[in-house]
Image (tube, coloured by chain):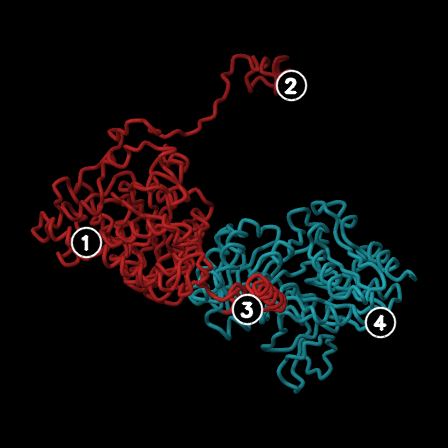
Chain colours: A cyan, B red
């Protein structure tokens, strides 16, 4: 698996590996990249602890913590009671002590019992104590649908967290970024919600659910540098440069957007936002001012979704550069269905029609 | 006919299944009724507490700190008391404190009371928006603070000002916080009395109820992970023991044997809801420990020596890796919930005077006098001195401003500390806020 590649093929523009030297890389899927990040941080920082339901001996229902308890010990990586309120609450207390906890919420759909501890406690502890106490936790949680998870294993609740002052929200879309962003999140002194798009754990799913999914091993961003590196929070990634239209996306939808743009042959500039708060507004403005057209894509429900915030920002800042109304492509305002999963999912048809509307001659 | 066992068999059963809301089909089943708890006394009622079982002082067994949790469980249904009606300290829970320590305890409680009185009046004078007194409950904060090590981490709720006072936090700093003035260390961000004092190992008070319980457990788990010797202690009222956080906290503490003390201050009232709305009609709050399999103690919260002894027992146990203890402090909220509350609207005015466990300051004073270590004159002199001490601190704090006077922290501090580094959107909003102030107050400078 290990290669000594001088050409990682990584399309990231983060440019932050800290060294011009070519560094060893390894092909990983997203789970392996997350596991690697946790392993590195547990080894580097004795204050890092990993806790959550089934994360210990078993290694997590998605295997993200496999082998970590055996390697780092039971007081560094351990199972918890089934109580998201308790998991986040003890993590806040551990942070106040001086630890750097990385709690896992098994599915984002389960995070709500812990919401008060996130919204009222972790998010405001630094502020309300004027810096006497901080909550440097990173809450990892698989999110998003497309796995026949039904309404309780498919949700994308990121907008609940981006609405909260004091929380950072991070969503990776590739193994390379998953590792670098997770390390940056753990090292960050603010509480971070780290949503992992579970549909792309094993491959960059492109929305064509009736076709076989490519594994990560054929994707350039599965070349993950060995060792410690950060992808900085608050920096978007230009997935592909283009002139005709800007696509703002994150998580699974980055890959869906890319596939649809390729299929339609549109010269789109695709931005993977990577961090919703803090948002890379400069990258968004620069791209939309260049292309004059903006498509916003997310899997979450539409009303009050993060796309609404993006749309407002683009309108406020780029109005006189726009050649067409901003388009939002999202999930529908329904609970995430089971049998009708692909009717809900913002797939190639919904994206394709939005692109057509955007590209219509004025 | 029509009883559940017949359903689907007889015609009557079939009918009742097809129209479950039709009362006529229920046969002779009695209608269900909802129990909504109601306190014994309402405004105008005579308060009579003769129904309360008050255990005899000194009669409760004191198990070894290293005992199995189950050995403490009889104490969850009893009431640990040390001071008897004559002011003597009796029985196995008598902590046998020396006179100097007892006087220190008395002084801290009296100072807490004097501070509360002054700040209550300051709120009425418009110097701040809000205040909460701890009158009658001083022992439940002062005595634990003395039983804990000074660097044990305390996770209080809003009525444990006695912890800060006992730990020597400057009164001026407390008042600066209450006045939200330009010297307020919390930058005017928090409601009055929601202190934070890291140097005193006093955790930031939330104001959201019971959230501090799992946090205290997490802190205690961290201390255990690191092989530290410090323990954690948390407080909440009996009302908020109904929150999920309370139960999450106890579950985690039990699972990981966390070195933590849980204090439930059962002061009978959660604003206007009596303790029955938190389950007090069924059993004691200490009895929650039984279900979790952790140690539990129920203590006369107006008996400072009993509170000290129980706290010390729990602290020694936690420090020796004996795990968590739940302590119910049975006490009475002698004043309103806060300056925004009028208890005359919902409870009998006689309750305070009739409360069968007396007043903690009076009881400790009597004890010291009985020991020949104190006198009424000395007490009166101390009270006068404390009033002056608080008055001087208030005057000092007022030099930094009172709420609404404009002597607050600069506008930009509104935006600082949301994150460690200020992101662009907060920078923009900060500029907007400063711009608005300049328009509103053209001569304004910060």
Q: Report the residue marked by disc 4.
A: A243
Q: Viewer-nearest of labels 3 and 4? A: 4
Q: CA distance from mark 3 to mark 4?
A: 36 Å
**What residue is shown with label 2?**
B19
| Residue A62: quarter of image | bottom right
Which comes sooner in the sequence, label 2 or label 1? 2
The answer to whether residue A302 of the structure is visible from this angle is yes
Q: Are marks 4 and 2 in contact (CB under 8 Å)?
A: no
- Point out the tag, 3 or 4, that comes first from the N-terminus: 3
Q: Secondary structure at mark 1?
A: helix
Using residue A3 as the reference point, say whether residue A323 is left or right of it.
Answer: right
**Circle 1: is it few (<14), some (14-19), or many (20+) Cα within 10 Å?**
few
Can residue B66 be seen at all in this image of the molecule? no
Alpha carbon distance from label 4 to label 1: 80 Å
In terms of secondary structure, where does tag 2 sit?
loop
B232 on left or right of B440: left
Q: State the CA–CA distance, disc 4 to disc 2.
A: 66 Å
Q: Chain of mark 1?
A: B
Give the secondary structure at mark 3.
Answer: helix
Residue B197 image position (x, y, % from top left): 37, 63
Q: Chain of mark 3?
A: A
Residue located 24% across and 29% down the image: B50
Q: Quadrant of the N terminus of chain B?
A: top right
The chain letter for the residue carrying disc 2 is B
From this viewpoint, which residue is outermost toward the left?
B372
Q: Is residue B19 left or right of residue B205?
A: right
Reply above or below: B390 against B265. below
The residue closer to the viewer here, A173 or A15, is A15
Q: Kindly identify which numbered label has been placed on residue A186.
A: 3
Instruction: For marks 2 and 1, give the CA distance.
Output: 74 Å
- Label 3: few (<14), some or many (≥20) within 10 Å? many
Question: Dot 4: what SS?
Answer: loop
């Amino acid at each position: 698996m290990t290669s000594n590649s001088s050409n990682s093929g990584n399309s990231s523009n983060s440019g932050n590996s800290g060294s011009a030297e070519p560094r060893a890389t390894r092909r990983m899927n997203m789970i392996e990249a997350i596991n690697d990040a946790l392993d590195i941080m547990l080894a580097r920082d004795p204050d890092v602890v990993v806790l959550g339901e089934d994360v210990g001996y078993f290694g997590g229902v998605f295997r993200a913590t496999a082998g970590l308890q055996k390697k780092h010990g039971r007081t560094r990586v351990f199972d918890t009671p089934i109580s998201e309120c308790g998991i986040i609450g003890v993590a806040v207390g551990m942070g106040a002590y001086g630890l750097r906890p990385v709690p896992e919420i098994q599915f984002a759909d389960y995070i709500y019992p812990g919401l008060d501890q996130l919204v009222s406690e972790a998010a405001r502890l630094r502020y309300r104590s004027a810096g006497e106490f901080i909550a440097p936790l990173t809450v990892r949680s698989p999110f998003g649908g497309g796995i026949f998870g039904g309404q309780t294993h498919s949700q994308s609740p990121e907008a609940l967290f981006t609405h909260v002052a004091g929380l950072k929200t991070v969503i990776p879309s590739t193994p390379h970024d998953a590792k670098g962003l997770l390390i940056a999140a753990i090292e960050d002194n603010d509480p971070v919600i780290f949503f992992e798009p579970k549909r792309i754990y094993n491959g960059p799913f492109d929305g064509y659910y009736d076709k076989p999914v490519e594994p990560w091993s054929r994707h350039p961003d599965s070349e993950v540098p060995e060792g410690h590196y950060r992808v900085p929070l608050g920096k978007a990634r230009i997935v592909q440069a283009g002139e005709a239209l800007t696509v703002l996306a994150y998580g699974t939808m980055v890959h869906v957007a890319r596939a649809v743009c390729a299929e339609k042959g549109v010269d789109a500039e695709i931005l993977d936002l990577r961090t919703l708060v803090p948002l890379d507004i400069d990258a968004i403005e620069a791209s939309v001012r260049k292309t004059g057209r903006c498509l916003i894509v997310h899997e979450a429900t539409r009303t009050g979704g993060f796309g609404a915030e993006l749309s407002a920002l683009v309108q406020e800042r780029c109005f006189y550069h726009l050649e067409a109304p901003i388009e939002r492509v999202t999930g529908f305002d329904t609970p995430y269905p089971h049998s009708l999963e692909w009717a809900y999912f913002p797939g190639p048809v919904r994206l394709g029609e939005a692109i057509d509307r955007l590209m219509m001659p004025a | 006919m029509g009883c559940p066992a017949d359903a689907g068999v007889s015609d009557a059963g079939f009918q009742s299944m097809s129209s479950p809301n039709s009362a006529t089909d229920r046969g002779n089943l009695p209608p269900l009724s909802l129990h909504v708890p109601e306190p014994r006394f309402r405004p105008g009622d005579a308060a009579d507490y003769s129904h309360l079982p008050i255990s005899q002082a000194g009669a409760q067994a004191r198990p070894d700190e290293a005992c199995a949790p189950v050995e403490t469980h009889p104490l969850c249904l009893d009431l640990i008391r040390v001071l008897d009606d004559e002011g003597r300290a009796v029985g196995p829970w008598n902590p046998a404190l020396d006179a100097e320590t007892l006087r220190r305890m008395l002084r801290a409680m009296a100072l807490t009371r004097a501070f509360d009185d002054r700040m209550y009046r300051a709120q009425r004078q418009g110097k701040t928006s809000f205040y909460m007194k701890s009158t009658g409950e001083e022992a439940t904060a002062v005595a634990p603070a003395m039983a804990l090590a000074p660097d044990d981490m305390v996770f209080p709720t809003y009525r444990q000002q006695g912890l800060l006072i006992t730990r020597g936090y400057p009164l001026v700093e407390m008042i600066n916080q209450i006045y939200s003035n330009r010297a307020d260390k919390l930058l005017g961000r928090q409601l009055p009395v929601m202190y934070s004092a890291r140097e005193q190992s006093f955790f930031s008070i939330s104001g959201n109820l019971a959230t501090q319980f799992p946090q205290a457990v997490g802190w205690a788990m961290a201390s255990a992970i690191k092989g530290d010797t410090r323990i954690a202690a948390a407080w909440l009222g009996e009302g908020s023991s109904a929150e999920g956080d309370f139960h999450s906290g106890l579950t985690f503490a039990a699972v990981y044997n966390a070195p933590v003390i849980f204090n439930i201050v059962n002061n009978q009232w959660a604003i206007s809801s009596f303790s029955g709305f938190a389950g007090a009609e069924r059993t004691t709050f200490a009895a929650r420990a039984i279900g979790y399999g952790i140690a539990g103690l129920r203590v006369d919260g107006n008996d400072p020596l009993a509170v000290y002894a129980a706290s010390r027992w729990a602290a020694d146990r936690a420090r020796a890796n004996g795990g968590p203890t739940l302590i119910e402090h049975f006490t009475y909220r002698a004043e309103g919930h806060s300056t925004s509350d009028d208890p005359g609207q919902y409870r009998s005015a006689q309750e305070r005077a009739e409360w069968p466990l007396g007043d903690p300051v009076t009881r400790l004073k009597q004890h010291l006098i009985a020991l020949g270590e104190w006198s009424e004159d000395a007490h009166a002199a101390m009270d006068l001195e404390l009033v002056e001490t608080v008055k001087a601190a208030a005057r000092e704090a007022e030099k930094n401003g009172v709420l609404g006077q404009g002597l607050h922290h600069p506008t930009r501090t509104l935006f600082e500390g949301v994150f460690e580094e200020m992101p662009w959107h907060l920078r923009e909003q900060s500029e907007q806020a400063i711009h608005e102030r300049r328009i509103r107050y053209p001569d304004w400078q910060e």
